[in-house]
Image (cartoon, helix red, strand yellow):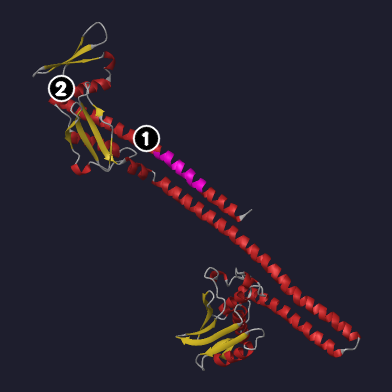
């Protein structure tokens, strides 16, 4: 499957998970919100009844039911020592709830609602419910004038509270109350804290899992591409020395039959050179594998760096096909304890790369310096440079850069991987600094 489609499917999967979680949470929120409002209303109703019963104990009333007509209406007469009050109601409304509403009407003048007591009862009922409230307030209202008769709600608490619907208390809808408590959104979200945390964890794990899967797929495809490039390059590079060796050995056999020993010797030497080149490739691959397994044997000995750099200068300034200039600088007495064979392979790989990935006029600077307990060795060239996007990958096995110019150069993409592996085995670190089309500098840092 095309990588583009894999990314699209992965992103869509993550979006579906997020959408489903959002729908589930929203549905739960609506359910909790409805339950919260019902709980507030229920607690308020209970508080009203309890507060009314408390006033009943302080003020007694006598009721007399007299039919008004032959149909359903009746007259309820309350007899007090001060005056008589008559209220008309329907008989079918005279249930316990209606009776309470009648009481509220009859009590409103002689024993009005005690707001603080009502609020205290209301607060206690909520405290015993699934939605305990931090704070509650009550407004006692005149429903005819739409004005507040009494309230225990502070002036600065006019917002950020949940306001219940205005509830009419008496049978003639002249008085009512409105309760205020914690913001419903906050209360519901607080109740949903566990579900929200669970959803967040699920989404995070889904994101991490899908990201990891996508990363693995991309990396696997990259490894597959690198492997294919390596196989193609290896086939090409191995076939050339093998074909050359076979070709020259065939000629050597023919010349041997004609007793042309000098020609035989030349062809055998050339065949040997090609086979040694082939052997060098295989050795490099084996050394990297051994280095990764920690199976490389090292034999350290003191090496005076500046004279050694002089030998490298002499060797690589004679490179055919390019004009190579190598300059060396540093303390004449700097000595590095290292494995000569592996250290030489490291330096030669860096110098060969500097020459390979440069123009016709190559300038290389070899410098050594001592910094505290470490020795730094830098190899700087004036070559093509390395794009910043490629620097994190240059030490990967079989990586050969993205530009066609670099890919046209011979090699397997093993040189820098081998260098990094061997530097690590010798106890050092390697750093790279480069600017495209200007320079590349590798710095080796070893303990003194």
Check if residue 442 falls in the magenta segment: no
Disc sitting over residue 216 in the figure: none
Q: How crowded is mark 2: few (under 14 residues within 10 Å), some or many (20 or more)?
A: few
- Residue 174 found in image quarter: top left
In the displayed structure, 83 sits above or below 45; it is above
Q: How many labels does the image show?
A: 2
Q: Residue at coordinates 67% horizontally, 67% vertically from top-left?
A: 229
Is 47 on the left or on the right of 219, as rendered?
A: left
Q: Residue at coordinates 18% horizontally, 34% vertically from top-left?
A: 115
In the displayed structure, 308 sits above or below 278; it is below
In the displayed structure, 132 sits above or below 312; it is above
Q: Residue at coordinates 26% horizontally, 13% vertically from top-left?
A: 91
Q: Name the residue under label 1.
A: 34
Q: Name the residue under label 2.
A: 60
Range covered by the magenta-colored residues? 15-29
- Residue 216 found in image quarter: bottom right
């Amino acid at each position: 499957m095309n990588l583009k489609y894999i990314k699209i499917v992965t992103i869509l999967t993550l979006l579906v998970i997020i959408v489903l979680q959002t729908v589930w949470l929203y549905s739960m929120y609506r359910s909790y919100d409805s339950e919260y409002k019902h709980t507030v209303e229920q607690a308020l109703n209970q508080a009203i009844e309890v507060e009314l019963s408390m006033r009943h104990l302080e003020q007694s009333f006598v009721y007399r039911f007299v039919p008004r007509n032959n149909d359903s209406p009746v007259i309820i007469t309350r007899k007090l020592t001060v005056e008589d009050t008559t209220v008309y109601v329907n008989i079918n409304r005279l249930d316990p709830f209606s009776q309470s509403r009648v009481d509220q009407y009859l009590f409103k003048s002689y024993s009005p609602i005690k707001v603080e007591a009502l609020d205290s009862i209301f607060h206690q009922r909520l405290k015993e419910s699934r939605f305990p409230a931090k704070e509650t307030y009550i407004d006692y209202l005149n429903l005819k004038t739409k004005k507040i008769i009494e309230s225990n709600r502070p002036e600065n608490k006019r917002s950020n509270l949940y306001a219940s619907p205005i509830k009419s208390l008496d049978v003639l809808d002249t008085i009512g109350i409105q309760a205020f408590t914690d913001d419903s959104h906050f209360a519901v979200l607080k109740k949903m804290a566990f579900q929200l945390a669970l959803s967040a964890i699920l989404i995070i794990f889904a994101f991490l899992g899908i990201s990891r899967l996508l990363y693995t797929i991309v990396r696997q495809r990259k490894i597959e591409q690198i492997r294919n490039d390596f196989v193609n390059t290896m086939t090409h590079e191995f076939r050339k020395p093998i074909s050359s060796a076979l070709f020259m050995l065939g000629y050597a056999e023919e010349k041997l039959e004609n007793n042309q020993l000098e020609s035989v010797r030349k062809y055998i030497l050339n065949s040997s050179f090609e086979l040694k080149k082939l052997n060098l490739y295989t050795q490099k691959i084996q050394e990297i594998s051994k280095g990764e397994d920690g199976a490389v044997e090292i034999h350290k000995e003191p090496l005076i760096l500046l004279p050694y750099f002089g030998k490298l200068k002499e060797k690589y300034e004679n490179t055919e096909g390019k004009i190579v200039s190598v300059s060396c600088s540093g303390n004449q007495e700097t000595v590095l304890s290292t494995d000569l064979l592996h250290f030489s392979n490291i330096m030669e790989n860096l110098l060969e790369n500097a020459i390979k990935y440069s123009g016709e006029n190559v300038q290389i600077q070899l410098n050594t310096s001592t910094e505290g307990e470490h020795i730094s060795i830098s190899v700087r060239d004036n070559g093509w440079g390395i794009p910043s996007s490629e620097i994190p990958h240059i030490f990967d096995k079989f990586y050969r850069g993205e530009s066609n110019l670099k890919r046209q150069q011979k090699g397997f993409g093993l040189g820098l991987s081998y260098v990094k592996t061997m530097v690590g085995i010798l106890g050092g670190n390697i750093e790279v600094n480069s600017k495209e089309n200007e320079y590349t500098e590798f710095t080796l840092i070893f303990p003194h």
